[in-house]
């Protein structure tokens, strides 16, 4: 039996749609204001000056080299970049910067816009995931305020105005985390494929994040296994089994797609994260008069091991 008049139901539904439209327009207005502030600052304080810091400069040079390769060889140069074994940190960041420049113009402002786009996508996903999980739009706006107040967004090194891999990787990891929450911690099987795509894109974007992805999935799997073992509720065990299965499936799909690419760059990864790190540590120990301690000896032994040395070449 329906206790509510039909016209009341229609009125509530219309009011709900109207409020959703208002919040959508507010979100668009916020994004427009952010874009305006971003481009004004870039035009006044970033683009006219030489790029500071070596990492940022190296990413700019790699992007311009790829743009030149696309002009010379066509779009096949993008595939070559995707499978480039000399890439030690990631393989899609420079590609995205080059594509953006080919579409919007080959200048620093266009290339740097990749950071703005990632921030906008992160905010969009963050807003709708909070609203979908809580049913409260006001909570979503509070979450947006907290996100935009994060100091990370404006770091001189790795912030939104710095063209290096750090900021976009930060946004991608945030998107990946939001999608895991959206999937109900892998409770909804139909949603895990979106999570997997985000995880694969994150790892291809920055290889090092495979550790974060594996750690998060491993931790969640351990929680579900403990729940299966300890829970006395049959219903809760059934849900935990489904979640554990989905986590395993997601991890396997990410591993199948990502591990071959990491293996292709194994020598570059070793050289960047192990060999160079040990060299920097030995130099630091020498400057601090720690040369007589076991630490420089450990670094040298790691570098001198024959199988590792062969990988670094």
Image (cartoon, rainbow, N blue to C red):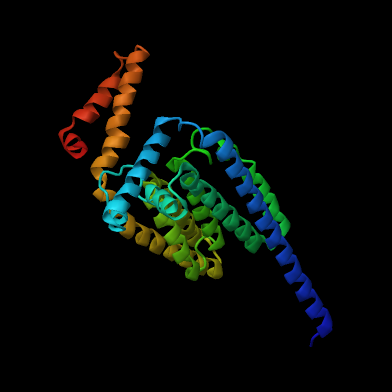
Residue at x 73% of width, y 56% of height: 138
* Quarter of the picture holding the C terminus: top left
x, y (%) of residue 13? 76, 75
Eyeballing the image, is 297 above or below 172? above
Q: On the rendered image, what quadrant is the N terminus found in?
A: bottom right
Q: Nearer the viewer, residue 184 or 42?
A: 42
The quarter of the displayed image where residue 208 is located: top left
Q: Quadrant of residue 37?
A: top right
Q: In this image, 78 relative to 176: left or right?
A: left
Drawn side of residue 119 relative to residue 98, left or right: right
Residue 236 percent location from the top left of the image: 55, 66
Frontmost residue, 90 versus 132:
90
Residue at position x 51%, y 37% in the image:
47
**164 over 132 or under it: above or below:** above
250 or 87, which lies in front? 87
Residue 178 appearing in the image: yes
Q: Position of residue 63 (x, y in %)?
A: 37, 45
Residue 251 in the figure: left or right of residue 142: left
Q: Residue furthest bottom?
A: 1
Q: Residue at x 47, y 53 (%)?
A: 104
Report the label total. 0
Residue 192 image position (x, y, % from top left): 46, 65
The answer to whether one can see residue 4 in this image is no
Q: Can you say whether 248 is above or below 61 in the image?
A: below
């Amino acid at each position: 039996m329906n206790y509510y008049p039909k016209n009341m139901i229609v009125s509530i539904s219309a009011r709900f749609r109207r409020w959703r439209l208002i919040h959508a327009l507010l979100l668009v207005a916020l994004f427009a204001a952010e874009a305006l502030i971003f481009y004004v600052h870039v035009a006044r304080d970033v683009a006219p000056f030489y790029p500071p810091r070596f990492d940022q400069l190296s990413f700019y040079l790699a992007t311009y080299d790829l743009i030149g390769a696309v002009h010379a060889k066509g779009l096949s140069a993008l595939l070559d970049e995707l499978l480039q074994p000399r890439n030690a940190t990631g393989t899609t960041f420079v590609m995205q910067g080059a594509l953006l420049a080919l579409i919007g113009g080959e200048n620093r402002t266009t290339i740097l816009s990749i950071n703005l786009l990632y921030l906008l996508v992160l905010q969009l996903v963050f807003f709708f995931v909070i609203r979908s999980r809580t049913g409260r739009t006001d909570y979503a706006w509070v979450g947006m305020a907290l996100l935009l107040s994060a100091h990370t967004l404006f770091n001189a090194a790795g912030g939104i105005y710095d063209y290096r891999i750090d900021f976009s990787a930060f946004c991608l990891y945030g998107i990946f985390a939001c999608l895991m929450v959206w999937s109900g911690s892998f409770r909804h099987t139909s949603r895990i494929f979106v999570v997997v795509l985000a995880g694969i894109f994150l790892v291809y974007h920055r290889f090092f994040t495979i550790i974060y992805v594996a750690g998060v999935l491993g931790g969640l799997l351990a929680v579900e296994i403990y729940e299966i073992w300890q829970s006395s509720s049959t219903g809760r065990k059934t849900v935990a089994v489904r979640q554990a299965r989905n986590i395993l499936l997601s991890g396997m799909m990410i591993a199948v797609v990502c591990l071959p690419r990491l293996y292709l760059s194994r020598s570059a990864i070793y050289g960047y994260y192990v060999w160079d790190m040990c060299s920097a540590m030995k130099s630091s120990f020498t400057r601090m008069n720690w040369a007589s301690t076991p630490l420089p000896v450990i670094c040298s032994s790691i570098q001198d091991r024959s199988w590792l040395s062969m990988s670094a070449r």
